[in-house]
Amino acid sequence: MTETARISRIRSGRRTDIRQQNERLILEAAEKVFAEAGFGGATMQLIADMAGLPKANLHYYFPTKEDLYRRVVQNIFEIWLDAASSFDAAAGPVEGIGAYVEAKMDISRRHPHGSKVWAAEVMHGAPVIQDYLETTLRDWTEGRIAVIRRWIDDGKMAPIDPRHLLYMLWATTQHYADFGHQIETLNAGHPLTDAQWREATESVKQIILRGIGAL
Amino acid sequence: MTETARISRIRSGRRTDIRQQNERLILEAAEKVFAEAGFGGATMQLIADMAGLPKANLHYYFPTKEDLYRRVVQNIFEIWLDAASSFDAAAGPVEGIGAYVEAKMDISRRHPHGSKVWAAEVMHGAPVIQDYLETTLRDWTEGRIAVIRRWIDDGKMAPIDPRHLLYMLWATTQHYADFGHQIETLNAGHPLTDAQWREATESVKQIILRGIGAL
DNA sequence: TCGCTTCCTGACCATATGGTCAATAGGAAG
DNA sequence: CTTCCTATTGACCATATGGTCAGGAAGCGA
């Protein structure tokens, strides 16, 4: 392939590239709009404008608003589950939970919109992802509970109810995304700096690890 | 109308009773609908049906949907602030934070809808209650931070960043309301029992109090 | 160039929804 | 009873929005 040909292909895009790129554009815009306005408050027109595409084009890639929403939620869910790997293959709670907190705080920082969409979905009774809660999330949770139980049995941490520990981990880490606006307001209106994010992560880690008697 | 007449009507007024009662009916229905559907997804018709009144009647008491929503959010905010009293007049973190956790867990249990509406409002950038965040909540927060600082100075707890401690308290307690559906799903589909709520409260208290070195 | 497929989009439609209004009922004061 | 104010409500309207569609543009293999 000649150089000019390659460039023109990148510019105008191959067919599959076009599809991928436009879907990505739409999903990014949708994530933001759904997070800021909720499912009911979001409009296809606004998402289209934000993605720089005509509205009818959205419906070409995503037949209905709900289809688009479902994809957004699924994307988040996958990112969310990936943080699980930090948990596994850890010798004890200090490494395992420490790494998990760091991973989840990182997600809160990098995907605040996604976290909000997820939160709203659950708050509304999980109309779209109920099956995920009952299968994937339940399995995931049971697995981690077993790990925590083992740590307790091995005397690596105090006998805390693993379930409530997990809820606390989710709550505290996701709070920095979901309530980011409130935190920013209480931070004199400024977003958290790198240093403040580090402090937040360290505070959470320290309180929880000490709280479960792992330090 | 004479002055006495007006007073007697206000005092004895069965009319004002009607107003009060209907406003309460509407606010209760609205809180639930806003929590379950979000502001954009909620419809005046649904709120009206749930309150057992014709839609036009809602607009008689609350001119616009936003007026109604604002009242709902304000109600929650007041309940929310009342939990502050648990914090004050405490000798140290064990009593103060312990009582605060209990109060907030109680609110999560008794007012799950309100908590969700508040969460959604903040997640959407607090379009309606931004001024409250910047005034009342900011002042409240500064006050508690001062209290926590004193406890630290008095050696009653470890030198934790008070701000992140507060965020953790808010996050963990409100999580049981906002993510109640997820928790219920992970609890084999059953709502938490009295005993489970007590366990949850104790777990949260214990982890945090131990985590900040107050035990 | 030709034919096939994918992609694009302005115009359009059916419906849902927030909000209005005029007419009416009903209790209380005089 | 009359008057006045509050409360009630069915009918109605303007608008916004999700979704459709037909026609055309553009990529691509042969």
Image (cartoon, coloured by chain):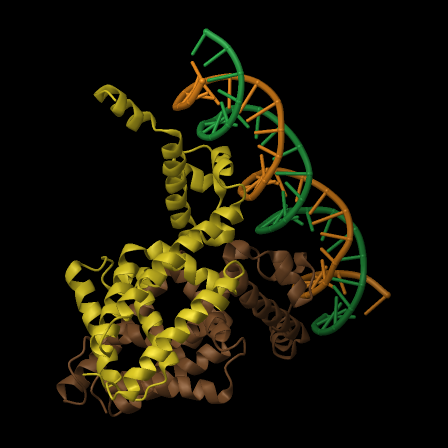
Chain colours: A yellow, B brown, C green, D orange
* B166 up-or-down from B132: above or below: below
Identify the image quadrant of the C terminus of chain B.
Answer: bottom left
Quadrant hosting residue D19: top right
Nearer to me, B121 or B70: B121
Relative to B213, B128 lies left or right: right
* A141 up-or-down from B127: above or below: below
Q: Where residue A205 appears, x then y in whole percent?
A: 22, 74
Relative to B179, B172 lies left or right: left
Nearer to me, A20 or B75: A20
Identify the image quadrant of the N terminus of chain B.
Answer: bottom right
| Residue B85 makes an appearance in the image | no
* Residue that appears at 64% across and 57% down: B45
Q: Where residue A145 appears, x then y in whole percent?
A: 37, 78
Nearer to me, A20 or B46: A20
Nearer to me, B24 or A128: A128
Count of numbered circles in the view:
0
* Residue that appears at 40% across and 45% down: A27
* Residue that appears at 54% across and 67% down: B31
* B29 up-or-down from A78: above or below: below
Quadrant hosting residue B210: bottom left
| Residue B118 makes an appearance in the image | yes
Q: Where residue A84 appears, x then y in whole percent?
A: 32, 66
Relative to A151, B70 lies left or right: right
Relative to B141, A72 lies left or right: right
* Residue that appears at 13% across and 85% down: B153
Q: Where residue A163 appears, x then y in whole percent?
A: 39, 79
